Image: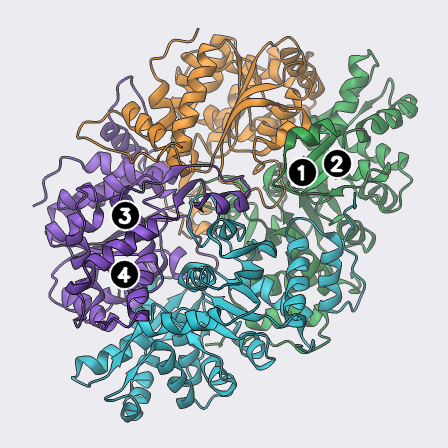
Chain colours: A purple, B cyan, C green, D orange
Amino acid sequence: METVKHIEIKEGITAKELVKEMQKCGVIGAGRIGKAAEIFEEMLNNKCKIFLGLAGAMVPGGMRNILKDLILDGYIDVLVTTGANLTHDLAESLNFPHIKGESNVDDSKLNKKGLDRVFDSYLQNKAYQKMEDLFNEHLSEIEGKRLSGSQFLKLLGSWIKDKNSILRVCYEKNIPIFSPALIDSGIGLMLWGLLAKGKKFDILMFDDLKEIMDLVWESKKNGVFYIGGGVPKNFIQQAMQFSPNMSDYGIQITMDRVEWGGSSGAELKEGISWGKMKPKGKFVDIKCDATIALPLIYSYLKGIKRK
Amino acid sequence: METVKHIEIKEGITAKELVKEMQKCGVIGAGRIGKAAEIFEEMLNNKCKIFLGLAGAMVPGGMRNILKDLILDGYIDVLVTTGANLTHDLAESLNFPHIKGESNVDDSKLNKKGLDRVFDSYLQNKAYQKMEDLFNEHLSEIEGKRLSGSQFLKLLGSWIKDKNSILRVCYEKNIPIFSPALIDSGIGLMLWGLLAKGKKFDILMFDDLKEIMDLVWESKKNGVFYIGGGVPKNFIQQAMQFSPNMSDYGIQITMDRVEWGGSSGAELKEGISWGKMKPKGKFVDIKCDATIALPLIYSYLKGIKRK
Amino acid sequence: METVKHIEIKEGITAKELVKEMQKCGVIGAGRIGKAAEIFEEMLNNKCKIFLGLAGAMVPGGMRNILKDLILDGYIDVLVTTGANLTHDLAESLNFPHIKGESNVDDSKLNKKGLDRVFDSYLQNKAYQKMEDLFNEHLSEIEGKRLSGSQFLKLLGSWIKDKNSILRVCYEKNIPIFSPALIDSGIGLMLWGLLAKGKKFDILMFDDLKEIMDLVWESKKNGVFYIGGGVPKNFIQQAMQFSPNMSDYGIQITMDRVEWGGSSGAELKEGISWGKMKPKGKFVDIKCDATIALPLIYSYLKGIKRK
Amino acid sequence: METVKHIEIKEGITAKELVKEMQKCGVIGAGRIGKAAEIFEEMLNNKCKIFLGLAGAMVPGGMRNILKDLILDGYIDVLVTTGANLTHDLAESLNFPHIKGESNVDDSKLNKKGLDRVFDSYLQNKAYQKMEDLFNEHLSEIEGKRLSGSQFLKLLGSWIKDKNSILRVCYEKNIPIFSPALIDSGIGLMLWGLLAKGKKFDILMFDDLKEIMDLVWESKKNGVFYIGGGVPKNFIQQAMQFSPNMSDYGIQITMDRVEWGGSSGAELKEGISWGKMKPKGKFVDIKCDATIALPLIYSYLKGIKRK
């Protein structure tokens, strides 16, 4: 039987050493952060296809650089995310950074100032005007086309100049982005606006399903990394069920609970019953605000070369 | 200043009287159940268009009859939901009811038995075979067509014979169903299966966006009822922003928290900053397992005639 | 294998019938409410000693009548609770009911008005002055005495005239009250105030430990009912470990989570490892706001005669 | 208006730099970790009396060294904690470290092996035997005495040889420990065992109330640091109400929620209404597993000299 080691902190400790202390500790929340770092390192060493499912207010929450770096470092092979995260990334690319605000606030005053609130951050509503301009400018690239959502998002990435943009770096690194509920987002609204004005093009979301199925079908080894639940997690889980090899590794960071039965809070091991996760796979469920857990885990990984 | 009245329970108390006691009490969770009942009653009396956003394991959780009745009673005008809830409804319609199970269980054993776990309930995996049969049987009705997601779901409702089916009663009562991430579900997989076999048809999700926008555009008064967050809530909220009249009423039942900044846990009043909710609207945020809160609220409403 | 039955609600359904529907349903949160009702009924039929551990803002939350009735109905044999609940009960007995308020409020304004906030309810600060008067009036009954906390609380119950008082009905029905952290409460402060003025008496909390140990030692069959966690739950659990018969039944209503490792969120079954709960006992963990779950469960029980 | 800065992580980043990045970010969870570090630093620079309220499974969770170091570094002036944390500290001092375990486990098997489970860690039950030996050995130091809880805990600290013991370092550094519900703990049980055998001594918990009141009465500036809620938080909050200077600074790490109205989840600013917190004070509420948040904050502080 192994004993719990208490975390020890010396002045000047690096973040990586701190995560190693958490690994040694091995229990409750700290232990799970440690285990996630270990599993991610193994994914990087074991030639598996890494799927990032990304939900929640990650861009307003200050995680944009880390996400961009995860991609630039080559730690992610496929990104599945909400339209909101992409829309927020796009807004920042167009010079509308999020603004530090407050959560205990009179929302009708914000409305008059043109500030859209996301908990304790704000987005200027006029960002949407700039997005519209961008879409109009590049209209010819989509008119008359039949595109999957993911093909469109690649195109969108090519329109962005900001080097910190998640959409941009995915385009550059040729990382596919899936956003299964794309119509449920500011980006979706831009496309709808063009269609409503009579422009002709088809965005065929069922082609996205085909694309991700092809990706998992050919994959020998899979790893999943879920930040938040919702559609991004479920869409990857669903694809894993059709992979001949299921998922060998899984890391999930969420505050959702198991008790209500929804997919967002479900333990990764529940996926074993469905044939999504390998019975002998390595999984860890972290119950923590992702804006705290992700920087810790990434600090540990930073610098590791993928094999 | 009004004092807190303590809830008083007499033998034989009806569920409606219990909710009225909660109204009198007026604070913490019980008070919010009471307020939700009051707001819903006002929605029924005030000729507003009622949008139900439905997420979470509601069918596995025993809420199917209540949801079906909400529709049959005419309490709902538009349904936005996850593909999972529709898939589970479809499975039950095909004689695959959910099974009472356990959450502390060996998932690899379940896998061998063909049981897919949803927390403490199971679904037989062979239900998916039956769904495939149904889709094959009705293939001619979609082949060669261009359909919005909602048009397809109406068609699907017409294929179902089970009178307790949510899909079926929406078809009968002509209630539109939107499922913005339809590709992220068993139903989506069925359609993908047909496309993969070379069948030709287009499911155009962006037409759904147009349809819901038209619905809110013409609406004089809106009320939103959210069970769970996720895409269903956000999709309705997004549409409300484009309604000339925003939302006058809002009820939200969720266990998600505000502190992580995601849409699922956001207070309804945050929507005021975005122009989705009316500054003087009536809103209540209930933090409760929906399988407990919904039956209570519905017990209060049952029998009220909508004006 | 048993299937999930969907809850069915007819107009005029009684709250008891609603809980029976939840029993039939058998899964997720509703199913747990149903199971709790069943377990409590069995406790009432099986001659076991029933310990209520009560934490959280139950009096400000409108639960005072139900708690009082639980005692008057003879459904509770031992009460362990926080000093706060007793202090709030005392305040209401002295004509300081809680006041319906708001949670998004300027607390410094409330402070100037002499209102102490408990989430969305307020207590008038001058209630404490009235408590002081009561203690001064009855000072002779404690001066020079050595009393256990529970003996003192019985005395305090006898000073109260309000028939709705939990303290009062416990006194009348001879139900012992333990409040292990009594010094952490308004009532504790009253006693400290007297000691600080030089009055002489000893409140010996370790005598409470002896008293509850004697109670469990002689008990043939035990049942525990926890509303909230904290000291009340843990103090009863600790006593159960020393009962020759452990606990046969357990119901826990809490929103605390298991993942942080604290006693408040721990599953009841964890108590089996400690020898507090019987391996074959009947337990249910309900994750719900107690101001919603308790009225439902009590509605089911009301009218049952204890054997 | 200040914009949200995205956290940036370079290889080899120190944990302190990581927390500074979180400060820059300024929103959601990461921002709160950053703010807590800033507030704690200000407390260390501003000659205030720092009260640590400590609840939850901190010793089983691997936090013992950090807590011990916080005291050795002179960062804490008063400790208020649960009996459980002290008991776990004592067990480890007697060579019964906690053991890494699992949470999905058959608790009756653990029971047979003499292992008491605390979520995913275990404690050997025979640790209690060793504690009993220690108490018997030092019996003469308490027999015939009248001691406050805090005086007893100081004595207990002097019996411990383990230099990593929280109890021991508090004794050495003359830091008072209050454990208001001491009877609700293994240590309380040891004392009860002696009393039950007829040994004579009085542990007078109301003297603890007097002692902490004296401490706050004379204090010019106060800061509170709450890890978890429960009695430790409330006992300090209660004392602050009687401090002529209330609390200028507050940091709270908890996963409890505000919505149920209990003290554990209450925002620090609620304390303003009660006169516990200064209206212009600096407060931060962190919603995070303390085993993750505390090491981060402490990494930032480590090395700062208190003024």
Disc 3 residue type (three-letter): Asp
Q: Nearer the viewer, mark 2 or mark 4?
A: 4
Element marked by disc 4: loop
Please report contact status of discs 4 and 3: CB closer than 8 Å, yes or no.
Answer: no
Cα distance in 3D space between marks 2 and 4: 50 Å
Q: Name the quadrant of the N terminus of chain B.
A: top right
Q: Read off the residue under disc 1.
A: C118
What number is the disc on residue C123?
2
Please report contact status of discs 4 and 1: CB closer than 8 Å, yes or no.
Answer: no
Please report contact status of discs 2 and 4: CB closer than 8 Å, yes or no.
Answer: no
Dividing the picture into quadrants, the one containing residue C143 is: top right
Q: Nearer the viewer, mark 4 or mark 3?
A: 3
Residue D109 percent across, percent down from the top left: 43, 50
Disc 1 residue type (three-letter): Val
- To the question of a shared chain for discs 2 and 3, the answer is no
Residue D15 percent across, percent down from the top left: 28, 26
Residue B122 percent across, percent down from the top left: 41, 71
Cα distance in 3D space between marks 4 and 1: 43 Å
Q: Read off the residue under disc 3.
A: A89
> What's the residue at 52%, 51% (across, down)?
B272
